[in-house]
Structure formats: C-alpha cells, structure tokens
Image (spheres, rainbow, N blue to C red):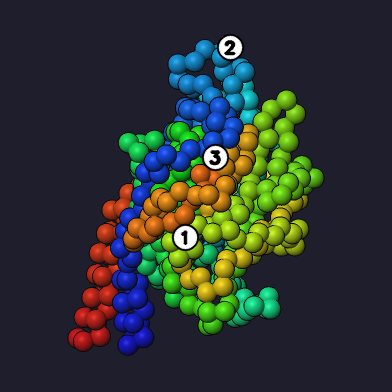
C-alpha cells in the first residue's frame, strides 16, 4: 500500500509550464538566400488523437484560399507533422513537399489524420517528396570516446509528470508546441519544441534560425548529471528517407526533386551550451535497419517499408550540462547555410526555458505511439488538468491507506 501511495504521489508531480521566448533577435537575419526565405502562406495546428499530441504545419507559395487554379498549378506546398515525445515513441517529424494545385489545397490536419490513423497512408500527392527525422537518445561519453552508462531514450516515462504548451511569438509570426519531461534513467530535464514561422529570422530561444521553408525540432537538456566534468553528452538524431532516394551532403541528407526544390533534413554545427553559442562536432553514419522507439508504421507509410537512415551523432563540449540544439527539416536552400558564420560575432540574448543568458551569435519494432495519458487539450491548461487529476488520485490513495 505504501508503494502504491508513492507511485500516486510521483504521478502528481507536474512541471511548471516552460517559458520559451519565440521573439526574434534584432539585427540578425538570414543573410544568404534571402529571397528563398521570403514570406509564404503558413498555418499551424495541434492534432491530438487518442495516442499522442502532434504539431502540424503547412507552408505554401500562394494563398490556398484566394489563389486561382492556374496560380496553384505552378505553386508548391510543404506539410510538417511532428510528434511530441510519448511513452512508446521518441519525438519524430515528417515533412512532405509537392507542387501543383492538389498539394496547395491539402489540409495539414487531414494529412496528419490519415498518416497517423490505424492504417497509416501517405497522400499520393506527396509521394517521393517526404523526409523524416527523430531525436533518439542521449548518452554520456568519456574523453576516450567510451560510453558511460546506458543510452537514455527521449521517452516520456509512465506515471510521470510533464508540461505541454502551445507557443506564439512575434505577433503570431512564429508558432510552436512544446513538452517538458524527465526521461527514465536520468535526473536531467528535457524540453522538445516544434517551431514554424511565417517569416525568416533568428529566434532568441536557442539562437534558432527559422523560415517559412523550415520545420524546427528544438531539444533542450537541463542539468545533465555527468559523472565527471571531463566527460561529455552525445545526442543521436536519425535522418530518414525512402531507400536510395537521398544523398549525404555535409551535415545534411538531401532528397533531390527533378524540376523542383530539394527536400532536406540537417544537423547544425552549433548549439547553445551553458548560455553560449559554440561549435559542436557532428558525424553522420549509416544506421542499422532496426530502430527502437520510432513509430515505424507511420514511417513505412511515409517513406516505404525499406527506408534509409543516417544517424547524426552530435557531441557537445566536455562538462556541458545545459544544452539547446535544433535539427531541422526543410525544402530549398538549407537554412543553416543562410547564416553568415563569421567568427566576428555580435552579442545578443538567448532565452532558456527558465532564464535569459548572454550568448555569442555569429550573424552567421513497428509500433503506433500510445501516450500514457489521455490526449491533452491544445494549450497549457492540459498541465493544470493533469496536475489536478493526479493530485486527486494521490489523495484518494492516502485516504484508502488511512481508513
């Protein structure tokens, strides 16, 4: 009985809603390929089926409501679907790209509903133009490159607290969805945030470059318990594409589209570490065919039954315990290449989930995800509801025990 009460009390622990600043840093722009990152018609929604919470996004080169059929015929559209971390699935995101009227008219929520249904299926309009990424895990490594302990998957533990919040910044030009939790096997706090934008710029949060052509997954790690300050944290992110369709270019995996824009998923060479923007080591390698904690039923529908995978190993500096990092999906010019990474940097601010710090920025296996809780409402009020319910359960258990 005492252990049952302890479990109930643990379930009552809920994180404070994160405070993430999605405003733009002043004076810092995407200085290269500026025309490619011009304004597009975008929208974002939260999709909450019984088995998880997803952030959906659509970006098109013409207005899907007012544009004529002839205008839509030569236009293009992108749809992104990102899963928040769950108990059986790590955070993963899918980006689909296509041209023509059917693509522009596609509704992101409808697209997500079919792709995430009991029998996942990809809209035929977007076949051949899909890529995906998944944040797999993190692990401590010693100076000799030997792993310390076990990998810690980005999974939401059963009977654990978490906070979820819809985000908006720059008068609605930037939107997002975030979840904060503590994975099993560590005391570190992890925040996974999806972000989309109607215009290009660099966010205060994570010094993250955003544009109407990119779909960001920002991962923040707080207070990673290194066993030795000489050791470092490695994060593993999977880049996924249909078999034989994409090529590795530097730190990106690129899917060429004949007569259209390339689709890509990429790792960034920089991260925010202890409040400072620093260069990190990124290495890509072909991954084994079997992935744990990825919803391969959905990926099979999007990419085909035999998809290719590259794992990006991101090694952060020794002793770093507080990290913000952002892999990305997009189309057209790779967004990181639009930054002018000149070491003569200007001083600007970056906002963590709990504090602001000064940083240097150069203007530079098949499972369907099932959450351990009911689908959350599309706002931070879900956290309060979860807290109240968990607290009532805990109190009820105490009453049972006492009487």
Label 1 vs 2, first from the N-terminus = 2
Residue under numbered circle 1: 276
Q: From the top left corner, tell me how far across and down residue 245 is, in percent.
A: 77, 42
Q: Is residue 195 above or below residue 279?
A: above
Disc 3 element: strand
The answer to which of 93 and 401 lies nearer the viewer is: 93
Single out the mark in the foreground, 1 or 2. 1
N-term mark: 3 or 2: 2
Cα separation, mark 1 vs mark 2, equals 48 Å
Distance of label 3 from label 1 (alpha carbons): 24 Å
Dot 2 falls on a residue whose secondary structure is helix
Question: Mark 2 highlights which residue?
Answer: 70
In the picture as drawn, the residue positioned furthest to the front comes out as: 344
Question: Which secondary structure, mark 1?
Answer: strand
Q: Earlier in the sequence, mark 3 or mark 1?
A: 3
Q: Position of residue 291 (x, y in %)?
A: 67, 62
Residue drawn where x is 57% and y is 42% of the image = 340
| Residue bearing mark 3 | 214
Residue 331 falls in image quadrant: top right
- Graded by Cα atoms within 10 Å as few (under 14), some (14 to 19) or many (20 or more), the crowding at tag 2 reads few
């Amino acid at each position: 009985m005492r252990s049952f009460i302890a479990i109930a009390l643990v379930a009552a622990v809920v994180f404070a809603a994160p405070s993430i600043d999605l405003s733009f840093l002043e004076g810092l722009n995407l200085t290269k390929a500026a025309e490619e990152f011009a304004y597009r018609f975008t929208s974002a929604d939260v999709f909450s089926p019984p088995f998880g919470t997803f952030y959906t996004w659509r970006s098109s080169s013409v207005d899907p409501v007012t544009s004529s059929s002839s205008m839509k015929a030569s236009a293009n559209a992108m749809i992104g679907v990102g899963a928040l971390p769950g108990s059986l699935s790590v955070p993963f995101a899918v980006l689909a790209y296509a041209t023509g009227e059917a693509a522009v008219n596609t509704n992101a929520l409808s697209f997500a509903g079919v792709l995430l249904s009991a029998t996942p299926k990809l809209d035929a309009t977007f076949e051949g133009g899909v890529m995906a990424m998944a944040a797999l895990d993190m692990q401590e490594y010693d100076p000799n490159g030997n792993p310390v302990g076990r990998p810690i998957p980005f999974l939401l533990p059963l009977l654990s607290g978490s906070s979820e919040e819809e985000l908006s910044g720059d008068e609605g030009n930037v939107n997002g969805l975030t979840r904060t939790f503590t994975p099993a096997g560590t005391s570190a706090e992890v925040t996974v945030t999806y972000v989309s934008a109607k215009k290009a710029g660099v966010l205060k949060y994570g010094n993250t470059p955003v544009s109407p052509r990119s779909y960001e997954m920002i991962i923040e790690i707080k207070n990673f318990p290194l066993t030795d300050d000489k050791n470092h944290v490695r994060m593993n992110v999977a880049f996924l594409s249909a078999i034989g369709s994409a090529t590795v270019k530097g730190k990106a995996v690129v899917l060429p589209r004949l007569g259209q824009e390339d689709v890509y998923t990429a790792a960034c060479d920089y991260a925010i570490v202890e409040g400072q923007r620093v260069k990190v080591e990124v290495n890509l390698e072909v991954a084994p065919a079997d992935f744990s904690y990825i919803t391969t039923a959905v990926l099979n529908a999007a990419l085909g039954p035999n998809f290719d995978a590259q794992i990006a190993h991101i090694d952060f500096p020794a002793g770093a315990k507080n990290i913000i990092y952002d892999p990305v999906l997009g189309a057209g010019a790779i967004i990181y290449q639009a930054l002018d990474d000149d070491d003569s940097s200007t001083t600007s601010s970056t906002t963590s989930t709990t504090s602001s710090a000064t940083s240097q920025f150069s203007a530079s296996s098949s499972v369907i995800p099932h959450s351990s809780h009911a689908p959350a409402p599309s706002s931070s009020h879900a956290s309060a509801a979860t807290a109240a319910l968990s607290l009532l359960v805990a109190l009820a258990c105490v009453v049972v025990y006492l009487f």
